Amino acid sequence: MSKLLLSILICLLFVSCNSDDTDNSPLSGQTFVITSYVIETDVDLNGDGVFSNDLILENFISEGIYFDTFNDCLEAGQLYFEEEGIACPFASMPIFIVEDTALGEPEQIAICALFLCDGFSDYSINDDTIEFSFEDEIFKQGVFLNNTITITFSQDELETFELLNNEGTILSYNGSLTVTYTLQ
């Protein structure tokens, strides 16, 4: 009788250890916000005399008539982790252009290009690497360390964009972009 009871306990223990855990998302319920938006070139876009390669620190975008602001685009680009995976990471990427105002003065504008997707993309974390995939195909990797996710977009992944320097010159930028997301 004791052998039977011991066998049943071992089977129950084995079954409970192998039960299917429906929460396959270790970051479930967490939101990561964009805290830096770094290009390869130092610029002074806000006219404070300090050159930086982080466009958030330069915070130069003003609201255009028909365009979303840079800050709105950053907010739309937050990473929301859910139990099923993550919904549409990198869903918004600002496009920077310079247009002339009605008075003929150049003005910096950000257009927030939102990309819609169906379903959820998956992600996996291995050591300090996070990989995002869709339909079992990895489409982006990043570094996951100290409650931050850092993702670099290569020059090939980005459109060339224009930045209006403080002195009025236009920088045509076609380098890489590194975005850092921090746990909110």
Image: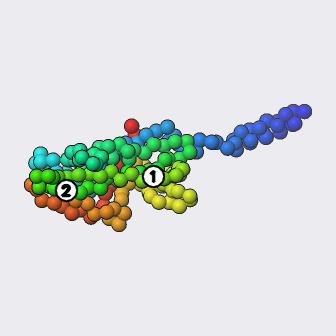
Give me the residue at 48% from left, 53% from top: 117
Q: Quadrant of the C terminus?
A: top left
Q: Position of residue 115 (x, y in %)?
A: 42, 53
Q: Is residue 99 above or below residue 26?
A: below
Identify the disc placed on residue 99: 2
Q: Residue furthest front?
A: 102
- Report the amino acid beneath label 2: Glu
Coloration of the structure image: rainbow
Q: Is residue 18 above or below residue 38?
A: above
Q: Residues within 10 Å of mark 2 (few under 14, many from 20)?
A: some
- Report the amino acid beneath label 1: Leu
Identify the disc placed on residue 165: none
For this rendering, which residue is in front, 148 or 68?
68
Q: Is residue 183 above or below residue 151?
A: above
Give me the residue at 24% from left, 46% from top: 65
Residue 40 visible to an observer of this rendering: no
Q: Position of residue 105 (x, y in %)?
A: 11, 54
Identify the disc placed on residue 116: 1
Secondary structure under the numbered disc 2 in the rendered image: strand
Q: Position of residue 175 (x, y in %)?
A: 28, 63
Q: Position of residue 178 (x, y in %)?
A: 32, 55
Query: For residue 171, which quarter of the picture?
Result: bottom left
For this rendering, which residue is in front, 183 or 90?
90
Q: CA distance from mark 2 to mark 1?
A: 27 Å
User: Mark 2 or 1, which is nearer the eye?
Assistant: 2
Secondary structure under the numbered disc 1 in the rendered image: loop
Give me the residue at 74% from left, 38% from top: 13
